[in-house]
Image: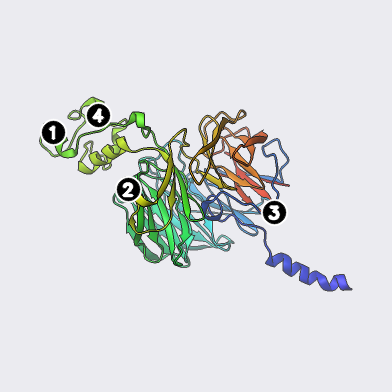
Amino acid sequence: MEMIRRIPLLLLLAQAAPGGEWTRFRGPNGSGVADDKPLPREIGSGKKFVWKTPVPMGKSSPVVIADRIFLTGHESGKLLTMAFDRKTGRELWRKEAPGNREEKRNKLNDPAAPSAVSDGRSVYVFFAGYGLVSYTGDGQERWRVPLGPFTNFHGMGASPVLAEGKVLMICDQDIGAFLIAVDQNTGKQAWKTERPEMVHSFSTPIVHRTDSGATEVIVPGSYQMVSYDVTGGAELWRVRGLTYQVKSVPVIGGSTLYFNGWAPGGEPSEHMELPAFEEMIRDYDKDHDGKLSKAETPKNWHPGTWDMQDRNKDGLLDKKDWEYYRMRRTSTNSAMAIRLGGKGDVTATHVLWKYRKSLPDVPGVLLYRDVLYLIRNGGILQTLDPATGRLLKQGRLPHALDEYYASPVAGDGKVYLISRNGDVSVVEAGGDWGIAATGEFGEEVFATPAIADGHIWVRTATALYDFGQ
């Protein structure tokens, strides 16, 4: 009888205490860390998994709430949002976005590259081909906000984030970059902040509660990191000195922000000092139209990709185009540490250190148990001291000498790294890291894994896997 009386209470407790969640790209505030439960030592298509389910094309990452997993994809020209049962992997529903506008993008980009974000009940998605859409957990559309068309040379890549009852979406592009906040419940615009100095960037912001209790959203962009007040979108502070094209995600440890930015041409050996636009017009503008054509520009000063600098695609470079290109040729790749806080331009006072050797392109830095991890193409893994930027160890992952697009994630003393070709390295965490296990999926992996409650979910080109202890 005692057990019978206890059953309803046990059921109630089970319903009220869901497992851990991973509600946005790279999990809790983009950290890439879930350290609450034991995690599997080995993952891969040939390893033991809880379940595996087929998924359509897409490069977004899974987000996980108490009872389901949300994922975006595309199929037959349709932009899709899907929900899967967390325990079984069974697809619960899929919904097509209200439209699909085809836009220019890099061949490595994807119509479903941005990841969803969830508040544990509803889900919010962004497609460059449409804009923002919100669905209930059961798949009923709540609201839609068309955005674009966009003029990002490589296509859009940032994911939405949530803060203070708002959905925040960074839309950096070649012309007309902006950060928008819409009401989480209605989709109504709360504010919109223009970012005219920004161009094509792909980094997802993070949110931070300041010492004063205010909430800021911190957004990497071309040449600078900028903080905005979530309440109204006013700029709080900025740090200059980033590279021109940012892709990775910042992370926060205590009162310090860490970030890695790499772009082609950002190495010191590739720098080139170019004349100011006024000098160029004076010396080379033969038709006196106030712009520079390819024929008028000395060949050794030509951009590697003219169309990338010609933002309005008229075949000519105006002053903004040229000055942006000048900044690009002197911008420097670096991993960096920034002390949070301050007002205005805090570059001179808040940059704690920079590290410029052997940097990742796309993967974000991982801060785990007081060590920074950076993985770059070729399977080169580095660990840094987060306090000083000092190199602790550099080595190659012998099983995975490949390109890397998925960011590293960690938990239970393990760091998980998956290469483009699906080769897995599980590393024992620590400055003097070592290989704990390897595996492979046998197909491409671009999506960053999700971790929660002792499980790790991996999206490959064709499937979503759940691995657990």
Answer yes or no: do the residues labelled 3 and 4 have beta carbons within 8 Å?
A: no
Q: Position of residue 235 (x, y in %)?
A: 34, 59
| Earlier-in-chain disc, 2 versus 1 | 2
Residue 149: in sight, yes or no?
no
| Earlier-in-chain disc, 4 versus 2 | 2
Query: Pointer 2: what residue?
Result: 198
Q: Nearer the viewer, residue 460 or 31?
A: 31
Q: Amino acid at mark 4?
A: Trp
Answer yes or no: do the residues labelled 3 and 1 have beta carbons within 8 Å?
A: no
Which label belongs to residue 285? Answer: 1
Question: How many numbered marks, from 0 up?
Answer: 4
Alpha carbon distance from label 3 to label 2 = 42 Å
Query: Pointer 3: what residue?
Result: 87
Alpha carbon distance from label 3 to label 4 = 57 Å
Q: How is the image coloured?
A: rainbow
Task: Identify the secondary structure beneath mark 1.
Answer: loop
Q: Position of residue 162 (x, y in %)?
A: 48, 60
Which label belongs to residue 124? Answer: none
Alpha carbon distance from label 1 to label 4 = 14 Å
Alpha carbon distance from label 4 to label 2 = 22 Å
Q: Amino acid at mark 2?
A: Met
